[in-house]
Image (cartoon, rainbow, N blue to C red):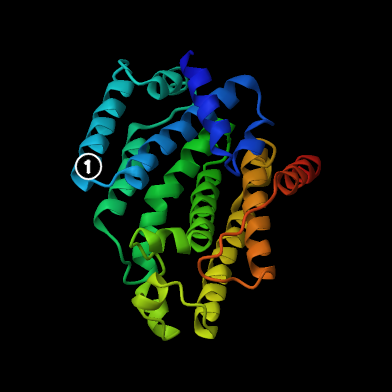
Amino acid sequence: MNPDQYCWKKTKKSKSNFYYSFLTLPKTKRSAIAALYSFCKEVDDIVDNSKNPELAHLKLNWWQQEVRSLFDGKPNHPVSRALAPHIKSNRLQEEHFQKIIEGMRMDLTIFRYRNFEQLKNYCYHAAGVVGILAAQIFGHSNPDTLDFAVELGIALQLTNIIRDIGEDANRGRIYLPLEDMNKFKISETEVLKLADTENMEKLIFFQLARAESFYDRAFTMLPRSDSKNQKTSLIIANIYFALLQKMKRNRPQIGCRINLTNWEKIGVAVKTWIVC
């Protein structure tokens, strides 16, 4: 199995909302974005699957060095070797890959967020810089497109946070800002025990509205001149936005993980492709 096959297999196996959008890309860009996605999955899995924080830190340290080796032209891991041909052609920067690793490391040390500004900083590292790298792979002529990518990345991460409240609680993590929880009179214990109360529903609707505002800003920030280049980004955005709307329609309940069906994802992808 060559590096590209390794990354595409990993991307397909994940059954991610991104998968159907990647299918619309030309082969070279599809290989590049699958390699980027696989990199993110590799470092994310270190945190999610490890029961030993010290070992997880060591593995992230290894990836930090591997990224340096990648940009020195000496990649070792299959994902790094798959990324290597796309670094210069897409002007990808090492600092963005390192920031993604920093974002994953936050999950090993930070289990509560005092306010939204702290959470937004986490979202920037975990997803905003991924948006920048993806936008560079898709192609852009206007630098404002990278601002769109950051805003969209944060919107996607907020959507994931709301969807995964139950799974994160089982790991002892609460991403909902404590400031918001206090506003709706929700305790940490209630979140960790997945209490289904009226106040909890109000809190989740508040988070959904905030995420929706990031989608709205992202859509308005994308320069018209780059809309065709960023068609894949828009497919991803619309799939996640559809997920957000589905969560709103189905009375958001803490611990209830809502997903789109494969046909729903394909339908959104086709509609976006036609419109763009």
In the picture of the structure, the residue carrying the numbered disc 1 is: 57
Q: Is residue 256 left or right of residue 97?
A: right
Picture coordinates of residue 199 (x, y %)?
50, 84
Residue at 57% x, 42% y is 16
Q: Is residue 140 left or right of residue 92?
A: right
The answer to whether residue 99 of the structure is visible from this angle is: no
Considering only vertical position in the picture, is 113 above or below 125?
below
Three-letter residue code for mark 1: His
Considering only vertical position in the picture, is 251 above or below 62?
below
Total numbered circles: 1
Picture coordinates of residue 127 (x, y %)?
45, 48
Picture coordinates of residue 41 (x, y %)?
43, 37
Q: Nearer the viewer, residue 165 or 148?
A: 165
Q: Secondary structure at mark 1?
A: helix
Residue at 53% x, 47% y is 149
Residue at 51% x, 44% y is 146
Residue 186, quarter of the rendered image: bottom left
Q: Judge the density around disc 1: few (<14), some (14-19), many (≥20) Cα neighbours within 10 Å.
A: some
In what quadrant of the picture does the C terminus appear?
top right
Q: Nearer the viewer, residue 81 or 99?
A: 81
Picture coordinates of residue 235 (x, y %)?
67, 44
Considering only vertical position in the picture, is 86 above or below 112?
above
The answer to whether residue 230 of the structure is visible from this angle is: yes
